[in-house]
Amino acid sequence: MRLVDFHCHLDLYPDFEALVAESERLGIFTLAVTTTPKAFARNNMLASSTKYVRAALGLHPQLVAERWREIDLWERLIGETRYIGEVGLDAGPRYYSSLDRQTDVFRHILRSCAREGGKVLSIHSVRAATKVLDLIEEEVPEGRAKFVLHWFTGSTAEARRATDLGCYFSINSQMLSHDRGRSLVASIPIERILTETDGPFTPNGASPSRPRDVKQTLSLVSKAKSIPENHCADLVIENLKALTT
């Protein structure tokens, strides 16, 4: 069974290099997202010799208040990868005070991706799904980039709007641990679903999730969509191909 972990912070594990090697050995397509552009170089170096691991260039919205000046470095690195993440907006209580700055940074990122063309973005949208979708509509002409909403917590109406805009959704086990999340996932067309761990921020028992643990997420998605697990795995692979070609 081929697996996809489309959002994992590999560089936040103590055995970062071993985890890259494990994903490669197991043939798990793993998107190594970064939280700042300063972290990208090492991720990209380790991923560059693999078939299955890809490094994404990020500037996490929760770090924008302190790290927004790194947008200049982000801009200099954009040509080195097709994948952008983790980027987006966070309007939760802890980060709301920086929302204007986050919006400026995310708008800059979207404009740069539209200019470059062909980028695939993994997007954070906590309490900000409508604003994220508004900015995508405003800044990115159709066909200039592709979007994956990571750990989506918006409403079913917002999910429907995102689907109409062509967005994909990367689903993790935590999303499927409660009725609201299961209902939301059930409402998303299967052809727009990818799987993720968001490790190390999700647990697998007493330990942080690793890319290999995405199989458990796949099992939960298959139940939410009433699809046999093997078939669900094949569909996720097909979705990944559609996203990246």
Image (cartoon, helix red, strand yellow):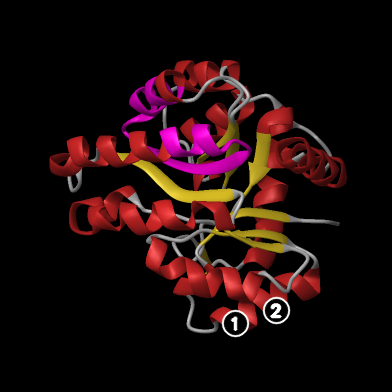
Amino acid tagged 1? Glu
Q: Quarter-wise, where is residue 212 in the image?
A: bottom right
> In x, y percent, where is residue 58?
43, 54
**Residue 206 visible to an observer of this rendering:** no
Q: Rounded to the nearest whole Å, what is the CA distance between mark 2 and mark 1?
A: 6 Å
Secondary element at image label 2: helix
Classed neighbour count for the residue bearing mark 1: other residues with Cα under 10 Å, few (<14), some (14–19), many (≥20): some
Residue sitting at x 63%, y 24%: 143
Left or right, 140 with reference to 193: left
> Which range of residues does the magenta coloring cover?
111-136
Q: Which residue is disc 2 drawn over?
A: 21
Residue sitting at x 75%, y 72%: 24
Left or right, 238 with reference to 222: right
Residue closer to the observer: 121 or 130: 121
> In x, y percent, where is residue 179?
50, 34
| Position above or below: 238 against 215 | above
| Position above or below: 38 against 13 | above
Q: Are marks 2 and 1 in contact (CB under 8 Å)?
A: yes
> In x, y percent, where is residue 19?
62, 77
Residue closer to the observer: 91 or 84: 84
Q: Which residue is disc 1 drawn over?
A: 17
Amino acid tagged 2? Ala
Residue sitting at x 58%, y 50%: 83
Secondary element at image label 1: helix
Classed neighbour count for the residue bearing mark 2: other residues with Cα under 10 Å, few (<14), some (14–19), many (≥20): some
| Position above or below: 44 against 95 | below
Which quarter of the rendering shows the N terminus? bottom right
Residue closer to the observer: 48 or 15: 48
